[in-house]
Image: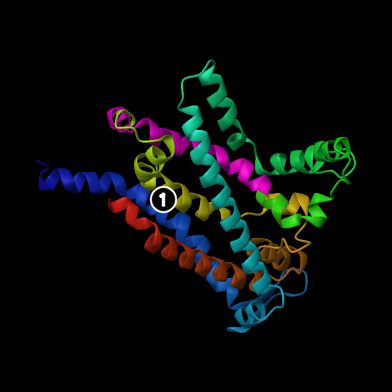
Amino acid sequence: MATKASRSAARLMMAPAVILLLGWMLVPLTMTLWFSFRKYLPLRGGDLGWAGFDNYTRFVTSSAFWPSVMATLTVVGGVLIITVCLGVVLAILLDQPMWGQGVVRILVIAPFFVMPTVSALVWKNMFMDPTNGLFAHLFKFFGAEPIAWLSQASMPSIIMIVSWQWLPFATLILLTAIQSLDSEQLEASEIDGAPPLKRFWFIILPHLGRAITVVILIQTIFLLSIFAEIFVTTGGAFGTKTLTYLIFQRVLESQNIGLGSAGGVYAIILANIVAIFLMRIVGKNLDN
């Protein structure tokens, strides 16, 4: 049993890491809050004084604000649906014995280690180019007219690119969960004559509930800040301007640090609302 002295020593040893972590989080947040109440234009006079809630009002009343929120939620929702559904299918397939199983698993997981900028460039130039892309050649082979994906189907294209990046993560988590399933339970259901679909629905899927919850929560946190894929492919055009990209435009293109900081605060609020909603809806699986 830990003594009072050992507990004090443990707290003392953990203190530097805790202080560093708090500083790492609180300093940027404090600076963002401070600048959000200032009229700060680096190339047009610098700090022009206190602005109050003017930056917040201007940002939320902008014609691009609500469309950017909807675009953000559309990307997050679309990617989550694709990665969870396909992740379950791939996890089940990869759990089956096959020749070269280790190599196949590595190839499936590999896209997760590709940088978002590189991934977006590959999809933009090698797959979605309307003239020389792979999809264009496939359309021509079947006698169809190629599609300019990034302009005619911009949002599905972004969702496809991001899903390709995050599908390996979902597959890896779900595959680990499937491998922890008691094989005797599946064998007993098979002996009792349960068809594969019912075994999946009543045994495998409930067992994956906690893993699916973890995948949804972690991916949502990162997907709310998606930026590189949009910057490289559409540049925020054709209805793909997310809240993160809108903040980028306000800060760098408009050179308005105060307005961009107010947008950052709104992004934090949106992230917390989504996180609370998800925890209430699917987070109950973590207690089961």
- Is disc 1 surrounded by few (<14), some (14 to 19) or many (20+) residues within 10 Å? many
Q: Is residue 97 above or below residue 93?
A: above
Q: Where residue 149 appears, x then y in whole percent?
A: 80, 50
Could you say which quadrant of the image residue 250 lies in? bottom right
32 vs 284, left or right, is: right
Q: Which residues are magenta?
A: 160-189
What residue is rendered at 65% in x and 39% in y?
115
Q: Amino acid at mark 1?
A: Thr
Indicate whether residue 172 is drawn in magenta: yes
Q: Is residue 32 visible?
A: yes
Between 237 and 58, the residue placed more toward the observer is: 237
Q: Is residue 47 above or below residue 206?
A: below
Q: Where residue 206 appears, x then y in whole percent?
A: 35, 45
What residue is rendered at 57% in x and 54% in y?
223
User: Magenta stretch mostly in which secondary structure?
Assistant: helix
Q: Which residue is mark 1?
A: 213
Q: Is residue 225 visible?
A: no
Quadrant in the picture for the N terminus: top left
Between 250 and 213, the residue placed more toward the observer is: 213
Could you say which quadrant of the image residue 69 lies in? bottom right
Q: Is residue 36 above or below residue 89?
A: below
Which residue is farthest front? 193
Q: Where residue 90 appears, x then y in whole percent?
A: 53, 34
> How many numbered circles are shown?
1
Tell me the element at label 1.
helix
Q: Where residue 284 appears, x then y in whole percent?
A: 33, 57
What residue is rendered at 47% in x and 54% in y?
24
